Protein backbone atom coordinates (compact mmCIF):
# COMPACT_ATOMS: atom_id res chain seq x y z
CA UNK A 1 0.00 0.00 0.00
CA UNK A 2 1.17 3.55 -0.77
CA UNK A 3 0.08 4.83 2.64
CA UNK A 4 -0.97 3.30 5.92
CA UNK A 5 -4.69 2.48 6.10
CA UNK A 6 -6.93 3.98 8.72
CA UNK A 7 -8.28 0.58 9.85
CA UNK A 8 -6.59 -2.79 10.01
CA UNK A 9 -9.29 -5.48 10.13
CA UNK A 10 -8.07 -8.66 11.81
CA UNK A 11 -9.95 -11.94 11.33
CA UNK A 12 -8.74 -15.11 13.07
CA UNK A 13 -10.08 -18.26 11.44
CA UNK A 14 -9.95 -22.03 11.66
CA UNK A 15 -11.79 -24.40 9.30
CA UNK A 16 -14.56 -21.84 8.74
CA UNK A 17 -14.21 -21.19 5.01
CA UNK A 18 -17.87 -20.58 4.16
CA UNK A 19 -18.47 -18.40 7.21
CA UNK A 20 -15.27 -16.52 6.45
CA UNK A 21 -16.57 -15.79 2.95
CA UNK A 22 -19.65 -14.16 4.46
CA UNK A 23 -17.46 -12.03 6.74
CA UNK A 24 -15.24 -10.97 3.82
CA UNK A 25 -18.26 -10.19 1.66
CA UNK A 26 -19.47 -7.83 4.40
CA UNK A 27 -16.11 -6.09 4.39
CA UNK A 28 -16.19 -5.73 0.61
CA UNK A 29 -19.54 -3.93 0.96
CA UNK A 30 -18.22 -1.33 3.42
CA UNK A 31 -18.96 2.25 2.42
CA UNK A 32 -15.70 3.42 4.03
CA UNK A 33 -12.81 1.94 2.07
CA UNK A 34 -9.63 3.05 3.85
CA UNK A 35 -8.70 -0.30 5.36
CA UNK A 36 -6.57 -3.41 5.07
CA UNK A 37 -7.70 -6.92 5.95
CA UNK A 38 -5.51 -9.48 7.71
CA UNK A 39 -6.85 -13.03 7.82
CA UNK A 40 -4.84 -14.99 10.37
CA UNK A 41 -5.41 -18.69 9.83
CA UNK A 42 -4.87 -21.05 12.77
CA UNK A 43 -3.99 -24.04 10.60
CA UNK A 44 -7.18 -24.58 8.58
CA UNK A 45 -7.41 -27.80 6.59
CA UNK A 46 -10.56 -26.91 4.65
CA UNK A 47 -10.90 -24.72 1.54
CA UNK A 48 -10.11 -21.46 3.34
CA UNK A 49 -7.26 -20.61 0.95
CA UNK A 50 -9.58 -20.92 -2.06
CA UNK A 51 -12.02 -18.51 -0.41
CA UNK A 52 -9.18 -16.07 0.31
CA UNK A 53 -8.00 -16.21 -3.31
CA UNK A 54 -11.35 -14.78 -4.41
CA UNK A 55 -10.82 -11.56 -2.46
CA UNK A 56 -7.26 -10.47 -3.27
CA UNK A 57 -8.53 -8.36 -6.19
CA UNK A 58 -11.28 -6.69 -4.14
CA UNK A 59 -9.29 -4.97 -1.36
CA UNK A 60 -5.86 -5.02 0.28
CA UNK A 61 -5.67 -8.44 1.90
CA UNK A 62 -2.93 -10.20 3.84
CA UNK A 63 -3.25 -13.91 4.52
CA UNK A 64 -1.06 -15.58 7.14
CA UNK A 65 -1.20 -19.27 7.99
CA UNK A 66 0.30 -21.04 10.99
CA UNK A 67 0.19 -24.44 12.62
CA UNK A 68 -2.93 -24.93 14.71
CA UNK A 69 -2.58 -23.31 18.12
CA UNK A 70 -6.11 -23.91 19.39
CA UNK A 71 -7.68 -20.51 19.91
CA UNK A 72 -7.99 -16.98 18.50
CA UNK A 73 -5.46 -15.18 20.74
CA UNK A 74 -2.27 -16.13 18.89
CA UNK A 75 -3.73 -15.60 15.39
CA UNK A 76 -5.02 -12.18 16.47
CA UNK A 77 -1.62 -11.26 17.90
CA UNK A 78 0.06 -12.29 14.65
CA UNK A 79 -2.32 -9.99 12.80
CA UNK A 80 -1.71 -7.13 15.21
CA UNK A 81 2.04 -7.50 14.74
CA UNK A 82 1.90 -6.79 10.99
CA UNK A 83 -1.06 -4.37 11.05
CA UNK A 84 -0.34 -0.93 9.54
CA UNK A 85 -3.57 0.86 10.48
CA UNK A 86 -4.00 3.47 13.18
CA UNK A 87 -6.95 1.50 14.52
CA UNK A 88 -7.46 -2.25 14.79
CA UNK A 89 -10.96 -3.57 14.04
CA UNK A 90 -11.66 -7.10 15.22
CA UNK A 91 -14.01 -9.44 13.38
CA UNK A 92 -14.51 -13.13 14.12
CA UNK A 93 -14.81 -15.34 11.05
CA UNK A 94 -18.39 -16.40 11.83
CA UNK A 95 -19.68 -12.83 12.35
CA UNK A 96 -20.19 -10.04 9.83
CA UNK A 97 -20.72 -6.28 9.60
CA UNK A 98 -23.37 -4.05 8.07
CA UNK A 99 -22.22 -1.79 5.18
CA UNK A 100 -21.89 1.44 7.19
CA UNK A 101 -20.02 -0.10 10.14
CA UNK A 102 -16.60 1.41 9.46
CA UNK A 103 -18.03 4.75 8.32
CA UNK A 104 -20.05 5.15 11.51
CA UNK A 105 -17.06 4.20 13.63
CA UNK A 106 -14.86 6.72 11.81
CA UNK A 107 -17.41 9.50 12.24
CA UNK A 108 -17.84 8.86 15.98
CA UNK A 109 -14.27 8.15 17.03
CA UNK A 110 -13.33 11.67 18.17
CA UNK A 111 -10.32 11.00 20.43
CA UNK A 112 -11.51 7.58 21.60
CA UNK A 113 -8.94 4.86 22.17
CA UNK A 114 -11.52 2.06 21.98
CA UNK A 115 -15.05 2.05 20.58
CA UNK A 116 -17.69 -0.68 20.47
CA UNK A 117 -21.36 -1.27 19.64
CA UNK A 118 -24.25 -3.75 19.72
CA UNK A 119 -24.60 -6.77 17.43
CA UNK A 120 -27.77 -8.43 16.17
CA UNK A 121 -27.97 -12.16 16.93
CA UNK A 122 -28.55 -14.70 14.16
CA UNK A 123 -29.50 -18.34 14.62
CA UNK A 124 -27.61 -21.27 13.03
CA UNK A 125 -30.23 -21.17 10.25
CA UNK A 126 -29.41 -17.56 9.49
CA UNK A 127 -32.55 -16.11 11.04
CA UNK A 128 -32.26 -12.76 12.79
CA UNK A 129 -33.48 -13.18 16.35
CA UNK A 130 -35.45 -10.64 18.36
CA UNK A 131 -32.55 -9.88 20.65
CA UNK A 132 -29.10 -8.38 20.52
CA UNK A 133 -25.72 -8.74 22.11
CA UNK A 134 -25.68 -5.38 23.82
CA UNK A 135 -22.84 -3.34 25.18
CA UNK A 136 -23.43 -0.55 27.67
CA UNK A 137 -22.24 2.90 28.53
CA UNK A 138 -19.25 2.44 30.83
CA UNK A 139 -18.79 4.65 33.86
CA UNK A 140 -15.40 5.87 34.92
CA UNK A 141 -13.24 4.39 36.26
CA UNK A 142 -13.88 1.95 33.41
CA UNK A 143 -11.76 -0.77 35.03
CA UNK A 144 -14.03 -0.85 38.10
CA UNK A 145 -17.15 -0.83 35.91
CA UNK A 146 -15.94 -3.84 33.94
CA UNK A 147 -14.90 -5.77 37.04
CA UNK A 148 -18.10 -5.14 38.98
CA UNK A 149 -20.64 -5.17 36.12
CA UNK A 150 -18.99 -7.67 33.71
CA UNK A 151 -17.63 -7.45 30.19
CA UNK A 152 -19.52 -5.04 27.92
CA UNK A 153 -17.46 -5.38 24.75
CA UNK A 154 -18.20 -8.03 22.13
CA UNK A 155 -15.06 -8.80 20.14
CA UNK A 156 -16.53 -8.38 16.64
CA UNK A 157 -17.76 -4.90 17.58
CA UNK A 158 -14.47 -3.57 18.97
CA UNK A 159 -12.18 -1.04 17.30
CA UNK A 160 -9.11 -0.01 19.30
CA UNK A 161 -6.15 2.27 18.71
CA UNK A 162 -3.18 0.09 17.72
CA UNK A 163 -0.79 2.07 19.92
CA UNK A 164 -2.88 1.13 22.96
CA UNK A 165 -2.81 -2.58 22.12
CA UNK A 166 0.95 -2.38 21.61
CA UNK A 167 1.28 -0.64 24.96
CA UNK A 168 -0.55 -3.36 26.93
CA UNK A 169 0.89 -6.27 24.97
CA UNK A 170 -1.98 -7.71 22.95
CA UNK A 171 -4.04 -10.77 23.84
CA UNK A 172 -2.81 -13.14 26.53
CA UNK A 173 -1.92 -16.47 24.96
CA UNK A 174 -2.21 -19.80 26.68
CA UNK A 175 -4.70 -20.50 29.43
CA UNK A 176 -7.28 -17.77 28.76
CA UNK A 177 -9.01 -19.00 25.58
CA UNK A 178 -12.63 -17.73 25.56
CA UNK A 179 -11.93 -14.97 28.10
CA UNK A 180 -8.76 -13.47 26.61
CA UNK A 181 -10.75 -10.56 25.18
CA UNK A 182 -12.13 -9.57 28.60
CA UNK A 183 -8.60 -9.72 30.01
CA UNK A 184 -7.40 -7.38 27.25
CA UNK A 185 -10.19 -4.85 27.83
CA UNK A 186 -9.32 -4.82 31.54
CA UNK A 187 -5.66 -4.16 30.78
CA UNK A 188 -6.61 -1.40 28.35
CA UNK A 189 -8.86 0.15 31.02
CA UNK A 190 -5.81 0.47 33.26
CA UNK A 191 -4.10 2.82 30.77
CA UNK A 192 -7.01 4.79 29.26
CA UNK A 193 -10.54 5.91 30.12
CA UNK A 194 -11.36 6.75 26.49
CA UNK A 195 -13.94 4.02 25.88
CA UNK A 196 -16.93 4.89 23.68
CA UNK A 197 -20.14 2.90 23.27
CA UNK A 198 -22.44 3.20 20.24
CA UNK A 199 -25.93 1.96 21.26
CA UNK A 200 -26.68 0.61 17.82
CA UNK A 201 -26.24 -2.68 15.94
CA UNK A 202 -23.57 -2.32 13.27
CA UNK A 203 -23.10 -6.01 12.64
CA UNK A 204 -24.24 -9.57 13.27
CA UNK A 205 -23.28 -12.16 15.86
CA UNK A 206 -23.61 -15.79 14.76
CA UNK A 207 -24.48 -18.47 17.30
CA UNK A 208 -24.04 -22.19 16.71
CA UNK A 209 -23.05 -25.42 18.44
CA UNK A 210 -19.40 -25.01 17.43
CA UNK A 211 -18.83 -22.01 19.68
CA UNK A 212 -15.58 -22.21 21.66
CA UNK A 213 -17.33 -20.41 24.55
CA UNK A 214 -19.78 -23.25 25.26
CA UNK A 215 -20.13 -23.80 29.04
CA UNK A 216 -17.46 -26.06 30.50
CA UNK A 217 -15.23 -26.60 33.52
CA UNK A 218 -12.42 -24.92 31.56
CA UNK A 219 -14.51 -21.76 31.17
CA UNK A 220 -15.02 -21.70 34.94
CA UNK A 221 -11.29 -22.10 35.56
CA UNK A 222 -10.40 -19.37 33.08
CA UNK A 223 -12.99 -16.92 34.38
CA UNK A 224 -11.70 -17.45 37.92
CA UNK A 225 -8.16 -16.85 36.69
CA UNK A 226 -9.02 -13.54 35.00
CA UNK A 227 -10.84 -12.20 38.05
CA UNK A 228 -8.11 -13.34 40.44
CA UNK A 229 -5.52 -11.71 38.20
CA UNK A 230 -7.19 -8.28 38.42
CA UNK A 231 -8.86 -8.23 41.86
CA UNK A 232 -5.82 -6.78 43.62
CA UNK A 233 -6.20 -3.55 41.65
CA UNK A 234 -9.49 -2.84 43.49
CA UNK A 235 -10.17 -1.51 46.97
CA UNK A 236 -11.99 -3.74 49.47
CA UNK A 237 -15.52 -2.60 48.61
CA UNK A 238 -15.10 -2.89 44.85
CA UNK A 239 -13.25 -6.19 45.24
CA UNK A 240 -16.22 -7.62 47.15
CA UNK A 241 -18.63 -6.51 44.42
CA UNK A 242 -16.39 -7.94 41.71
CA UNK A 243 -16.31 -11.32 43.48
CA UNK A 244 -20.12 -11.33 43.74
CA UNK A 245 -20.35 -10.47 40.04
CA UNK A 246 -18.02 -13.39 39.27
CA UNK A 247 -20.23 -15.63 41.43
CA UNK A 248 -23.23 -14.68 39.33
CA UNK A 249 -21.42 -15.39 36.06
CA UNK A 250 -20.14 -18.73 37.32
CA UNK A 251 -23.62 -19.54 38.57
CA UNK A 252 -24.93 -19.10 35.04
CA UNK A 253 -22.20 -21.36 33.61
CA UNK A 254 -22.89 -24.08 36.19
CA UNK A 255 -26.62 -23.78 35.59
CA UNK A 256 -26.17 -24.24 31.84
CA UNK A 257 -24.02 -27.30 32.57
CA UNK A 258 -26.76 -28.78 34.76
CA UNK A 259 -24.71 -28.47 37.98
CA UNK A 260 -27.67 -27.17 39.95
CA UNK A 261 -26.34 -27.50 43.50
CA UNK A 262 -23.23 -25.48 42.68
CA UNK A 263 -25.30 -22.95 40.73
CA UNK A 264 -27.60 -22.62 43.73
CA UNK A 265 -24.64 -21.91 46.01
CA UNK A 266 -23.20 -19.31 43.66
CA UNK A 267 -26.51 -17.51 43.15
CA UNK A 268 -27.00 -17.44 46.92
CA UNK A 269 -23.68 -15.62 47.18
CA UNK A 270 -24.26 -13.26 44.24
CA UNK A 271 -27.67 -12.23 45.62
CA UNK A 272 -25.73 -10.34 48.34
CA UNK A 273 -24.54 -7.77 45.78
CA UNK A 274 -25.48 -4.10 45.96
CA UNK A 275 -26.05 -4.12 42.20
CA UNK A 276 -29.83 -4.24 41.84
CA UNK A 277 -29.67 -5.83 38.39
CA UNK A 278 -27.51 -8.76 39.48
CA UNK A 279 -29.38 -9.11 42.76
CA UNK A 280 -32.67 -9.44 40.88
CA UNK A 281 -31.21 -11.92 38.40
CA UNK A 282 -29.65 -13.96 41.18
CA UNK A 283 -32.93 -14.17 43.08
CA UNK A 284 -34.76 -15.19 39.91
CA UNK A 285 -32.37 -18.07 39.26
CA UNK A 286 -32.39 -19.08 42.91
CA UNK A 287 -36.16 -19.49 42.81
CA UNK A 288 -36.09 -21.24 39.42
CA UNK A 289 -33.46 -23.77 40.54
CA UNK A 290 -35.18 -24.46 43.87
CA UNK A 291 -38.43 -25.18 42.02
CA UNK A 292 -36.63 -27.49 39.62
CA UNK A 293 -34.84 -29.36 42.42
CA UNK A 294 -38.14 -29.71 44.28
CA UNK A 295 -39.84 -31.16 41.21
CA UNK A 296 -36.95 -33.56 40.65
CA UNK A 297 -37.46 -35.00 44.15
CA UNK A 298 -41.13 -35.74 43.54
Image (spheres, helix red, strand yellow):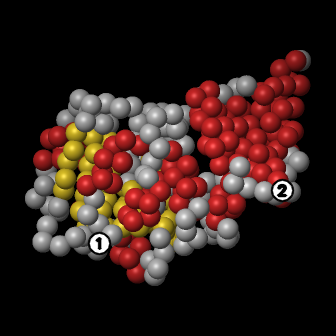
The C terminus is located in which quarter?
Answer: top right
Q: CA distance from mark 1 to mark 2?
A: 41 Å
Taking the spot 55% from the left edge, 34% from the top edge, the residue there is: 214
Q: Under tag 2, what secondary structure?
A: helix
Front residue of 153/126: it is: 153
Residue at the farthest top position = 298
In the picture shown, does residue 187 fall above or below 50?
A: below
The quarter of the displayed image where residue 246 is located: top right
Label of residue 6 in the image: 1
Q: Position of residue 297 (x, y in %)?
A: 88, 18
Residue 228: quarter of image: top right
Q: Which mark is residue 272?
A: none
**Residue that badge 2 annotates:** 237
Residue 38 horizontal side relative to residue 161, left or right:
left
- Residue at x 74%, y 37% (from the top left corner): 251
Expressed as whole percent of the image width and height from the top left, the position of residue 190 reads 59, 61
Q: Secondary structure at mark 1?
A: loop
In the rendered view, would you say 136 is above or below 68? below
Amino acid sequence: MDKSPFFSIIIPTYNSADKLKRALDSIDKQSFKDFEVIVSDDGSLDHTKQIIDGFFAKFHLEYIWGENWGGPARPRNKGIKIAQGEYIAFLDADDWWYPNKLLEIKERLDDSDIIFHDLDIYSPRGKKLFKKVRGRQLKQPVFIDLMTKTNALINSSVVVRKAIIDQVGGFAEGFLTCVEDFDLWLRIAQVTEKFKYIPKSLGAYWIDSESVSAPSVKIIERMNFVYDKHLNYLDDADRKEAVLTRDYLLGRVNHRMGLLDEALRLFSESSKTKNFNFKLRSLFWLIAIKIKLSLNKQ
